[in-house]
Amino acid sequence: MIRKVIETKEVLDYLQTRKILEQYKKSKEYILIGLLKNVDFKLRQPKKLQIYYFRINKQFRAYWVLDNEILKIFKIDNHQN
């Protein structure tokens, strides 16, 4: 169960610069209500690192780790590059 989603200032700046902050917020809402399939919620390889990602849109992914039911976003990546 995920209680909260937090992100760094750098992540928020990246989202605002690329004009995808609203799409990110919508994905974040889906996660908080448990609709994980809507954002393509997956564990990244190698699985032992326990790094996950979810889709913001067709182009961008948010990478995160789970810490005591708090999802911590540490990177936004352009999936098409």
Image: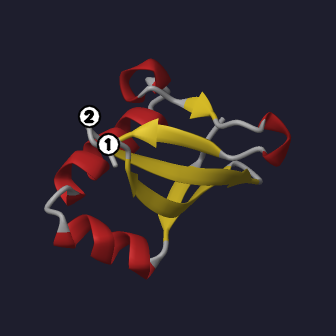
**25 lies above or below 59:** below
Please provide percent x and percent y for residue 57. 26, 38
Specify the amino acid type for callout 2.
Lys
Q: Name the residue under label 2.
A: 58
The reply, left or right, for residue 1 in relation to residue 80 is right
Specify the amino acid type for callout 1.
Gln
Please provide percent x and percent y for residue 67. 74, 56
**24 lies above or below 36:** below
User: Which element is circle 1 on?
Assistant: loop
User: Which element is circle 2 on?
Assistant: loop
Q: Which residue lies furthest to the left in this view?
A: 19
Closer to the chain start, of discs 1 and 2, is: 2
Rounded to the nearest angstrom, the CA distance separating label 1 from label 2 is 8 Å
Please provide percent x and percent y for residue 76. 42, 58
Residue drawn at the location 43% of the way across and 23% of the way down: 35
Q: Do the residues labelled 1 and 2 touch (CB within 8 Å)?
A: yes
The reply, left or right, for residue 48 in relation to residue 72 is right
Between 1 and 44, the one nearer to me in the picture: 44
Please provide percent x and percent y for residue 23. 22, 46
Image quadrant containing the N terminus: top right
| Other-residue count near label 2 (Cα within 10 Å), few / some / many at <14 / 14–19 / ≥20 | few
The reply, left or right, for residue 29 in relation to residue 64 is left
- State the mark number for residue 80: 1
Residue drawn at the location 26% of the way across and 34% of the way down: 58
Color encoding of the figure: secondary structure
